[in-house]
Structure formats: C-alpha cells, structure tokens
Image (cartoon, rainbow, N blue to C red):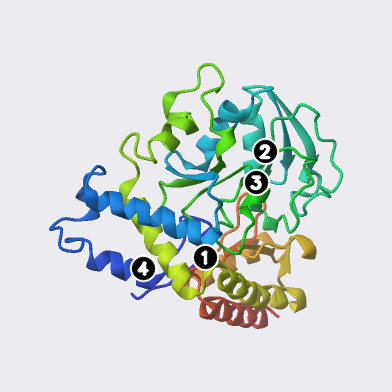
Amino acid sequence: MGRIFNFSAGPAMLPAEVLQEAADEMLDYRGSGMSVMEMSHRSKEYGDIITEAEKDLRDLMNIPENYKVLFLQGGASQQFAAVPMNLMKNKVADYIITGQWAKKAYKEAQMYGKANAIASSEDKTYSYIPDCSDLPISEDADYVYICENNTIYGTKFKTLPNTKGKDLVADVSSCFLSEPVDVKQYGLIFGGVQKNIGPAGVVIAIIREDLITEDTLAGTPTMLKYKIHADNKSLYNTPPAYGIYMCGKVFKWIKKMGGLDAMKLHNEKKAAILYDFLDQSKLFKGTVVKEDRSLMNVPFVTGDEELDAKFVKEAKAAGFVNLKGHRTVGGMRASIYNAMPIEGVEKLVQFMKEFESSIK
C-alpha cells in the first residue's frame, strides 16, 4: 500500500521528502557511522543539529534577539503548569476559554493562583471566538492566556486579544508555522510539534528574556523552570534528540517552500477548497462561524450520526484516514496542516461530492 492521505489532528503527516531524507540518514548520519537516534546529545554533531534547528526557526519566524527558543519535553499539556509556575508572580492570570485545551490550561492554573475566565465560547460548543477587543483584564494579572488555534473545534484567533498591556501567552500547537507571526506581540509562545513540525515528543517554547527568571513559584520542579533550560541551551538533560533533528528538517523544508508567507498562501488555498464545498453542499455542513474558521482544522457534520459513521468508514476504505471528529463535536474533522498537499484536499472534496450523490 502506498502513502495515504492522513487527516489526523496529530500526530499528523510530515512532508514525504523530509521522511525520505531521514530514512536515507537513518543508519549513518553524514558519515558519522551512526544514527541520530544513537548519538550523544553532548557530541559536536548533535550540537550542530540543535544549533542549526534553532537558527532556522529564528529565521522563519523572525524571532527577536531578546527571545529565547527552548526545545522541551512533556507535551503542550505540561506547559499548562509550567506557565503559571514561571510567570504567576502576582498569582493572578486571565484566561480566554475557546476550547478544551484552553479550559484544561485554565483549570491547571487554578492550582497555582487566581485564574480568571474573562471570556468564553463554551455556550455554543466553542464554535466561535469571543470578542476580545475590550475584556475585563485584571489589573494585577501576570499574563493573558489563549489557545490560538483550537484543534478540536476548528476556530482560530484572527485578531489577537487586546490585553491592555499585559503579556500574552499563546498555545499555538495546531497553527505553529502555518503563517507569519509577529513574535513581539507575545510574552510566550509554545506548542507541541506533532501537528505541523515533527514527531510527537517535542515542545517548542519561545519566551521573552525578561520573563525568564529564578523567581518561580515555590515547589516548581527543576525540570519545569524555564531559566534552567534557557541557561543550558535546551541541553540541561537529554532532550528529545531525534524529534528535534526531525523538526530541523521540517524548518528547512518550509524555507525551501518559500517561508511562512508561502505557507499561508498554500494553507489558505487548501482551506478554501474544502470550505467552499461545505458552504454549497446540501449534505455536509461546517460547524464554525465563517469569520473564525481555522486554516488547519475543519470540522463538519451531516447532522445524522449513522451517516457520519458511514462516511468515515467509506472514506477510510478510499484512502482518506483519521477523519472522525472529536467525541465532543461528533461528525468529521479534516486536519490539513502544512504537509497536506492541495491534491489531498481536492481528492477529499471529490470523494465527498460522490458520497453526497450516492445518498440522494
């Protein structure tokens, strides 16, 4: 069986040429006589890999010099605790709840201080982004927190919240490197890489230097202190070495594709093909208000659970896998990250048209 079209929300498909390059280097990385999987993280070869990966990411995102780039472990979910442990100096933080991951982060923060839910879209199953132009920001808030792209619900902040001068913390796991970003608008950006950038096991955090201090909450484990990782250039302990190597290859692939401006155009074109079909389909309907639609995750339903299940089953047989929606939304979800080719979305839409015709 050849390569299939994998619409998984994560771990998600990676560019085939990146996988091929990694396969070619699997047994012998550039004449070293060993795989990167076997390589000491203290070796010169690996030092070059992680240094170059950081440099390429800085180039892609135009990361200012006063921001540190950390390659971490523990998944984005571990950052739900690390963020308040490192940043909650006043023990107050404001959270905007636009989905399950933001809600989990908010609940985690309540363990460390006063977390305030200052806006939410839970009333309509997170199918929209609330108006964040004039929020009741707490005067003593240490930061304002968002999940920028909501993987499960298919919504995206098109305009960042007005934080009234407070630092913005954003979980960008499912929109990382999908479009240009102005890093200076954030105090801290973090995300798991297993959707757009690499294999599961790596988290990238981009943090403004003045937020990295020894002044963490009492009881913060050494491994959750940003300063430890920043001071040791992400090599305090053995990092997820092979995963970082793979991320580095994807950074080079994105550069070769034309950088983040080109990625945005590529992703907008793909998303438009699917959304345009959903908007005219008599059978399938998108679940998100138009102005807040994600370019990465597209949930849709037929309105009939049995029909949804039939579609998912037949799609899988036709080579379109992982289209089942999250249990909290039901229906289907097509995740169309950077590595999903336009052809994959075109063929999915063609299959959806044929399925719709067969139902009538």
Decide if residue 318 is in sight here: no
Q: Tell which residue pokes out farthest to the front in this image.
A: 65
Closer to us: 261 or 212:
212
Badge 2 density bin: few <14, some 14–19, many ≥20, Cα 10 Å: many
- Please, is residue 51 above or below residue 104 in the view? below
Q: Give, as a three-letter code, the residue at label 1.
A: Phe
Q: How many angstroms separate mark 2 from mark 1 (CA)?
A: 25 Å
User: Where does label 1 land, which residue?
Assistant: 7
User: What's the residue type where badge 4 is placed?
Assistant: Val
Say which amino acid is labelled 2: Lys
- Residue 345 position within the rendered picture, expressed as x and y whole percent measured from the top left: 57, 76
Question: Which structural element holds mark 3?
Answer: loop
Q: CA distance from mark 2 to mark 4?
A: 34 Å
Q: Which of pointers 2 and 4 lies earlier in the amino acid sequence? A: 4
Q: Earlier in the sequence, mark 2 or mark 3?
A: 2
Looking at marks 2 and 1 on the same chain, the residue that comes earlier in the sequence is marked by: 1
- Do tag 3 and tag 4 residues touch (Cβ < 8 Å)? no
Tell me if residue 324 comes above or below residue 212 in the rendering: below
In the image, what residue occupies the spot 52% across and 69% down? Answer: 259
- Label 3 sits on residue: 186
Alpha-carbon span between mark 4 and mark 1:
18 Å
Pointer 2 residue: 103
SS category of the residue bearing label 2: helix
